[in-house]
Amino acid sequence: MVVEERLNQIVEKEGAVHLTLIDPDSQLPEEAGKIAHEASLGGTDAIMVGGSTGATGATVEQTVQAIKSACNLPVACV
């Protein structure tokens, strides 16, 4: 299931979604994974990765992989 479909399902059921934004240029990928894990425990519905103009493709990819390893939430790059 794609991220948009999952978020639409949550909106239909709950009326809103909560997203956590993680900037890949603000911490190491391992720390981003820890942040995502804590956000999932706190009830966030999905993780967005983006926001920084300085992050390279490799940094973004490593961050996304760390997040996916740390939690089972949908991840969207913005």
Image (tube, rainbow, N blue to C red):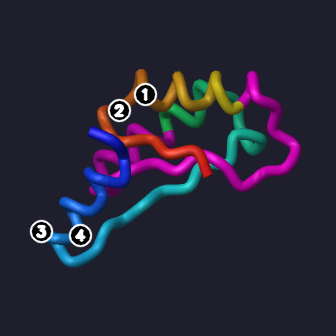
Q: Are marks 2 and 1 in contact (CB under 8 Å)?
A: yes
- Gap between marks 2 and 1 measured at Cα: 6 Å
Identity of the residue furthest to the bottom in this view? 15
Question: Which amino acid, mark 2?
Answer: Cys
Q: CA distance from mark 2 to mark 4?
A: 21 Å
The answer to whether mark 2 and mark 4 are in CB contact below 8 A is no
Residue type, mark 3 in image:
Lys
Magenta residues (range): 35-59
1 vs 54, nearest the viewer: 1
Q: Are marks 1 and 3 in contact (CB under 8 Å)?
A: no
2 up-or-down from 33: above or below:
below
Q: Which mark is residue 71?
A: 2
Tell me how far mark 1 sits from mark 3, CA to CA: 24 Å
The residue that disc 4 covers is 11
In the image, taking residue 77 as reference, residue 7 lies left or right, namely: left
| Dot 3: element | helix
Calculate the distance from the C-alpha at mark 3 to the C-alpha at mark 4. Answer: 5 Å
The magenta stretch spans residue 54? yes
Which tag, 4 or 1, sits closer to the chain's start?
Answer: 4
The residue depicted at 28 percent of the width and 74 percent of the height is 16
Q: Residue 14 location, x and y as percent?
A: 16, 72
The local secondary structure at tag 1 comes to: helix
The answer to whether mark 3 and mark 4 are in CB contact below 8 A is yes
Circle 1 residue = 68
The circle on residue 13 is 3
Q: Depth check: 39 or 2 in front?
A: 2
